[in-house]
Image (spheres, rainbow, N blue to C red):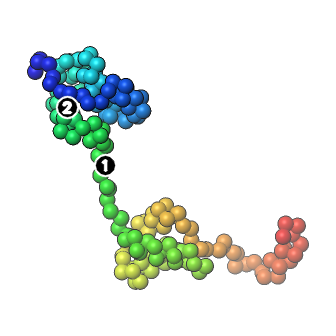
């Protein structure tokens, strides 16, 4: 383990230094730092790399073997999982967006929930429907402001005629 490493760093010091300056991801920065130390000759063994970097010996060894096999781009690639698939297929989402953009639209999330269950055969919880419509699609329901049942029609017309803003 104390023998010097037999690894050839293909990139120049300048390229490694520039990539170090550009990256903002901590693990990528550590990987580039290790390669730069090896390229400049500041460290020669895995033991020194472990002491300088603060990472475990097996982690550093795994990074170096990956660099040998696949190169710098694969070493720096950040793996990301695709996440959980949506419960609503994209075709159904498109139909829902189209229906929401119509003049009549929906007046409640419950109505959307029923439409999805009957027309699209997609039974979803109220909470799920609300989240998709309100936050994912950014749509709002077509619902007029509430009007008092005690309000007379004549009073509304009089107000509209005498109001300075209308």
Can you say whether 157 is above or below 9 in the image? below
Quadrant location of residue 126?
Answer: bottom left
Q: Position of residue 3 (x, y in %)?
A: 11, 18
> Which residue does the numbered mark 1 point to in the structure image?
80
Which of the two labelled residues, at mark 1 and mark 2, occupies the earlier sequence position?
2
Where the N terminus falls, by quadrant? top left
| Residue 30 in view | no
Can you say whether 44 is above or below 63 in the image? above
Quadrant location of residue 59?
Answer: top left
Can you say whether 34 is above or below 28 in the image? above
Residue in the image at 34% along x and 28% along y? 16
> Which residue does the numbered mark 2 point to in the structure image?
64
Quadrant location of residue 139?
Answer: bottom right
Q: Position of residue 88 (x, y in %)?
A: 38, 70
Separation of disc 1 and disc 2 at Cα? 21 Å
Closer to the camera in the image, 123 or 44:
44
Within-10-Å neighbours for mark 2: few <14, some 14–19, many 20+: many
Q: What SS does tag 2 mark?
A: helix
Where the C terminus falls, by quadrant? bottom right
Q: Position of residue 144 (x, y in %)?
A: 65, 74
Closer to the camera in the image, 161 or 76:
76
| Residue 85 in view | yes
Within-10-Å neighbours for mark 1: few <14, some 14–19, many 20+: few
């Amino acid at each position: 383990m104390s023998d010097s490493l037999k690894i050839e760093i293909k990139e120049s010091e300048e390229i490694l230094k520039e990539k170090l300056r550009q990256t903002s991801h901590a693990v990528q920065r550590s990987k580039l730092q290790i390669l730069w130390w090896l390229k400049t000759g500041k460290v020669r063994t895995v033991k020194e790399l472990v002491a300088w970097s603060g990472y475990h010996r097996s982690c550093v060894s795994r990074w170096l073997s990956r660099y040998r096999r696949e190169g710098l781009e694969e070493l720096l690639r950040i793996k990301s999982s695709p996440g959980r698939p949506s419960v609503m297929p994209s075709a159904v989402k498109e139909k829902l967006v189209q229906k929401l953009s119509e003049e009549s639209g929906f007046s409640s999330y419950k109505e959307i929930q029923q439409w999805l269950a009957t027309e699209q055969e997609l039974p979803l919880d109220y909470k799920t429907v609300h989240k998709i419509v309100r936050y994912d699609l950014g749509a709002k329901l077509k619902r007029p402001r509430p009007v008092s049942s005690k309000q007379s029609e004549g009073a509304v017309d009089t107000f509209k005629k005498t109001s300075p803003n209308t």
